[in-house]
């Protein structure tokens, strides 16, 4: 009986993986409008009923793509935070993890704001709504912990500091993933302006300087190395 259940579970997981890979391909090739239960069924050669056994609607499929992207981000953030780093560097590295994750999955990252919209949330399963909320809470709690466990930020300023970073980060993330045209306003490289603004923000909180955060390319390189090292360790 156990072997039969295991085979069924394996078959289910394989179908689910193919459904998501197909949706990801459609998103990459033609955009989110191309994703439908019918097209996924045609491309996977599964019946439409089989697709609906896995997902109740196309929005549910899209939400699952964003959830996978979110779990990758949580793992990346866990990889870059180190006790040996200054608080300022850790905050920069968490930000870098966002940029790196979005660069790896640009089409999916661009859907995050859409998936959070109330109309979209009303269409997806309760389980997916909960999982999306859990990812957001996990990331924000990581940042709150960074500030609260440091002696550099007064406890009554911890949530203000975390929210300030959160608002700045999601602002620039939306600009980058949705290709806002800001060059006419003089913002040719939004990520560079974000890094400069983040240093000003952290100066205002009284955080100690860290020369490594003066070079955005150095921060991104260090974050990439830490994420790659963590991935290699998980695969061995």
Image (tube, rainbow, N blue to C red):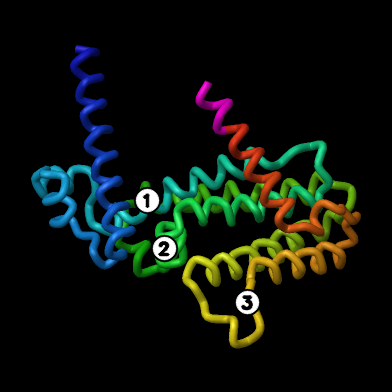
Q: Which secondary structure lies at badge 3?
A: loop
- Residue 84 horizontal/vertical position (percent): 82, 37
- Residue 234 located within the stretch drawn in magenta: yes
- Residue 194 horizontal/vertical position (percent): 69, 68
Query: Which is in the foreground here, disc 2 or disc 3?
Result: 3
Q: Are marks 2 and 1 in contact (CB under 8 Å)?
A: yes
Say which mark, if any, is on residue 188.
3
Q: Which residue is tagged 2? A: 111
Q: Which secondary structure lies at badge 2?
A: loop
Q: What segment carries the magenta color?
A: 231-236
C-alpha span from label 1 to label 3 = 30 Å
Is residue 66 toward the left or the right of residue 159 in the image? left
Q: Residues within 10 Å of mark 3 (few under 14, many from 20)?
A: few
Is residue 92 toward the left or the right of residue 8 in the image? right
C-alpha span from label 2 to label 3 = 23 Å
Residue in the picture at 67% in, 51% down: 220
Q: Which residue is tagged 1? A: 65
Q: Magenta stretch mostly in which secondary structure?
A: helix
Q: Residues within 10 Å of mark 2 (few under 14, many from 20)?
A: some
């Amino acid at each position: 009986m156990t072997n039969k259940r295991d085979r069924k579970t394996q078959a289910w997981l394989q179908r689910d993986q193919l459904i998501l890979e197909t949706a990801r391909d459609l998103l990459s090739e033609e955009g989110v409008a191309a994703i439908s239960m019918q097209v996924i069924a045609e491309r996977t050669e599964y019946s439409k009923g089989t697709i609906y056994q896995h997902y109740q609607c196309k929005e549910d499929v899209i939400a699952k793509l964003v959830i996978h992207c979110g779990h990758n981000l949580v793992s990346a953030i866990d990889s870059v935070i180190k006790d040996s780093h200054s608080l300022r560097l850790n905050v920069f590295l968490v930000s870098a993890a966002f940029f790196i994750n979005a660069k790896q999955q640009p089409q999916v990252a661009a859907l995050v704001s859409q998936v959070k919209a109330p109309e979209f949330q009303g269409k997806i399963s309760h389980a997916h709504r909960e999982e999306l909320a859990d990812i957001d809470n996990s990331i924000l709690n990581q940042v709150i912990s960074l500030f609260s466990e440091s002696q550099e930020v007064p406890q009554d300023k911890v949530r203000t500091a975390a929210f300030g970073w959160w608002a700045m980060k999601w602002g620039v993330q939306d600009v980058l993933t949705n290709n806002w045209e800001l060059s006419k306003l003089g913002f040719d490289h939004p990520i560079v302006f974000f890094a400069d603004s983040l240093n000003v923000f952290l100066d205002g909180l009284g955080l100690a300087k860290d020369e490594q955060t003066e070079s955005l390319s150095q921060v991104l390189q260090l974050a990439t190395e830490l994420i790659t090292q963590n991935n290699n360790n998980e695969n061995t």
